[in-house]
Amino acid sequence: MAETAPIEVPDAGTQRGVIPYFARNPVAANVLLFLLFVGGLIASDLITLETFPEYDPRIIRVEVPRPRLPQRSRKTSSSASRRA
């Protein structure tokens, strides 16, 4: 059988970036999570909610799309208007 080379796994201490940083510092990850949670609670209190939107009940607007009719030729439409 062929021998396999060992797989080298880089140490978390040598990697750079956000994820390796939080992998090395779990307290920092928990502090960030706590700050995001508290910020979400504060932001949820600032959102305005309307149960019933304000509107004028005297104005009603209804829009109904109508199908487009095929265009008639000018010759047919002009002859029809002469008869009427």
Image (cartoon, grey):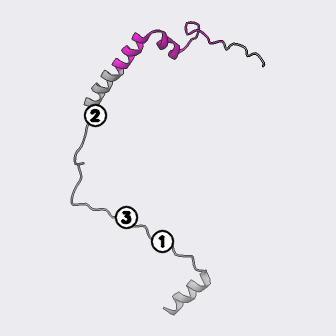
Closest to the observer: 77 or 64? 64
Figure quadrant of the N terminus:
top right
Query: Which picture quadrant has residue 45?
Result: top left
Q: Please say if 38 is above or below 25.
A: below
Residue 49 image position (x, y, % from top left):
25, 40
Q: Please say if 71 is above or below 35.
A: below
Label 1 sits on what residue type? Pro
Q: Which mark is residue 63?
A: 3
Closest to the observer: 65 or 83? 65
Q: Residue at x 52, y 13 (%)?
A: 20
Label 2 sits on what residue type? Ile
Q: CA distance from mark 1 to mark 2?
A: 42 Å
**Relative to 63, 21 lies left or right:** right
Closest to the observer: 42 or 71? 42
Give the main secondary structure, helix, strand or loop, of the magenta stretch: helix
Part of the protein shown in magenta = 8-35
Label 1 belongs to which residue?
A: 67
**Relative to 68, 60 lies left or right:** left
Q: Residue at x 34, y 18 (%)?
A: 35
Q: Which mark is residue 47?
A: 2
